[in-house]
């Protein structure tokens, strides 16, 4: 009877350890789920940032085309200025008009260049954010893998404890007989 009581206490202790291990497994599963949700949010942010970067690239290409057209207009104005200087009666008027057009074209070229530089800075900032988000995703994936390994070890311990408890029960039953 004393041996049976001692074995029953051992079984109770093993069952308490198994319950604690099961609780830890549930907590680690909850933490893994939370990290997976974080990883999914970061991956969505990376995709959104990539979409935004593509839109900014398209805008730069469009504004670069406008810059080229402005340069072509400036070249045409320069040609007109030369032709105007050949016309004796209207040289002064045409020359002045051409200079004003050239000044406007230069202003437009400078504005397009400044806008392009600003957009390039925005793209660099978006790419830096995307790199940081990618690094965070890699770190969270590593943490998730470590927690999954802990969970697997705890599940194995729970299974081992259950096997040990079954063996103790069989021993008690045999010794009780």
Image: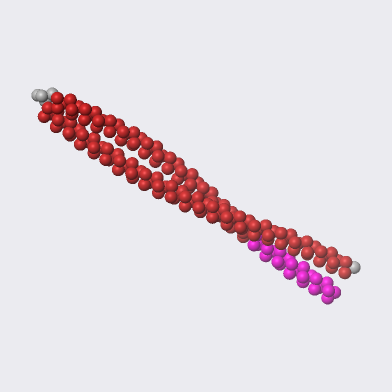
Q: Please say if 76 is above or below 141.
A: above
Residue furthest right in the image: 177
Left or right: 26, with 81 as reference point: right
Does the magenta-highlighted stretch encompass residue 17? yes
Work out whether residue 160 or residue 93 is closer to the camera in this orientation and state it: 93
Characterize the magenta stretch by its predominant secondary structure. Answer: helix
Q: Position of residue 177 (x, y in %)?
A: 90, 68
Residue at 74 percent across and 67 percent down: it is: 14
Q: Please say if 130 is above or below 71.
A: below
Q: Please say if 18 is above or below 107.
A: below
User: Is residue 30 visible to us here?
Assistant: no
Work out whether residue 148 or residue 13 is closer to the camera in this orientation and state it: 148
Residue at 44 percent across and 50 percent down: it is: 129
Residue at 24 percent across and 28 percent down: it is: 76
Quarter holding residue 153: bottom right
Work out whether residue 65 or residue 130 is closer to the camera in this orientation and state it: 65
Q: Please say if 35 is above or below 74.
A: below
Q: Position of residue 4 (x, y in %)?
A: 83, 72
Part of the protein shown in magenta = 1-25
Quarter holding residue 113: top left
């Amino acid at each position: 009877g004393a041996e049976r009581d001692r074995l029953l206490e051992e079984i109770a202790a093993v069952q308490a350890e198994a319950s604690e291990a099961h609780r830890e497994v549930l907590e680690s599963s909850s933490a893994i789920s939370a990290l997976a949700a974080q990883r999914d949010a970061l991956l969505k942010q990376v995709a959104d940032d990539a979409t935004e970067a593509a839109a900014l690239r398209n805008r730069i290409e469009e504004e670069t085309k406008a810059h080229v057209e402005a340069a072509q207009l400036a070249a045409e104005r320069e040609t007109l200025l030369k032709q105007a200087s050949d016309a004796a009666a209207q040289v002064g008027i045409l020359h002045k008009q051409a200079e004003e057009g050239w000044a406007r074209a230069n202003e437009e070229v400078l504005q397009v260049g400044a806008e392009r530089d600003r957009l390039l800075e925005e793209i660099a900032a978006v790419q830096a954010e995307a790199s940081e988000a990618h690094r965070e995703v890699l770190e969270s994936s590593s943490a998730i893998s470590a927690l999954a390994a802990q969970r697997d070890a705890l599940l194995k311990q729970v299974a081992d404890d259950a096997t040990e408890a079954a063996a103790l029960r069989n021993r008690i039953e045999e010794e009780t007989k």
